[in-house]
Image (tube, rainbow, N blue to C red):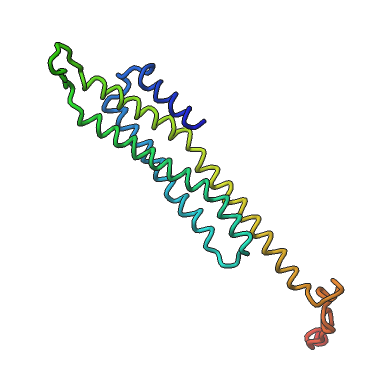
Amino acid sequence: MKLLFAGLAFLAGAFIIPTGWLNDDTAKLSVTVMGLLAAGILPTISLLVGGLATPSKTPKKLYELERKSEALLNGMILTLGICLIGCIAVFAYFILPSKSIWKIPKTSLSIDLAKYLNIAIHAILFTCLVMCVDRLRLVVIAFQKGHKARFELAISESKQKITDRMKGTNDITKLNRPDNEFGKVINTGEASNH
């Protein structure tokens, strides 16, 4: 499905979107958008990986957190690759010669190579931009899943602490019963002076 989505974006960029949409200003804007996305993904990856480094988690919970995080991390790394490909396409746009005629030997045919490279660059960049905008949701999903996993782990640790405190007691009132001195009135002598 993702490959089909990318293919449709590539075809739209190559044949439907006019090649004039890419100029110096839109190229700079494209690099800025992809750079901001990459700048948001890098700390998110760090946050997800850092969530695995807490020693108080049980092995079962660590495996669960790792399983949930792995797909997100792979998706974010793929998004960084898409951003890099898009930036390379912009770089190629700036260094591409405006005319490059390739003559086919022993024939009178010639191909305007620059024209077809320009179409390919437009299609690649358009595909990268569409995929990057689509993948913005990964950052939000990563924060939501990370928050949920940390909440579940906190609840689990809290339940474990309560269970550990209750071991060795048969009656819950023994856990909360005050000692004999609780509530005792102490005469400090100040009240008798008045």
Vertically, is 191 above or below 160? Answer: below
User: Residue farthest to the left?
Assistant: 106
Q: Quadrant of the C terminus?
A: bottom right
For this orientation, the residue located farthest to the front is 106
Which residue is rendered at x = 61% and y = 63% of the image? 59
Q: Pinpoint residue 88: horizontal percent, then vertical percent.
A: 29, 36
Q: Nearer the viewer, residue 179 or 34?
A: 34
> As displayed, is residue 30 above or below residue 56?
above
Q: Residue at x 48, y 27 (%)?
A: 4
Q: Which one is nearer the viewer's eye here, 127 or 101? A: 101
In this rendering, position of residue 58 left or right of residue 77: right
Q: Residue at x 32, y 25 (%)?
A: 122
Drawn side of residue 27 relative to residue 37, left or right: left
Residue 135 in the image, given as x and y percentages of width and height = 48, 37
Locate residue 157, reporting x and y percent: 67, 64
Residue name at image x 17 percent, y 15 percent: 110
**With respect to residue 80, does 161 lie above or below?**
below
Task: Please state the horizontal and vertical placement of residue 89, each as a whole percent of the image.
Answer: 30, 32
Looking at the image, residue 25 sits to the left or right of residue 1; the answer is left
Numbered label tally: 0
Q: Quadrant of residue 169?
A: bottom right
Q: In the rendered view, tell whether residue 109 sits above or below residue 59.
A: above
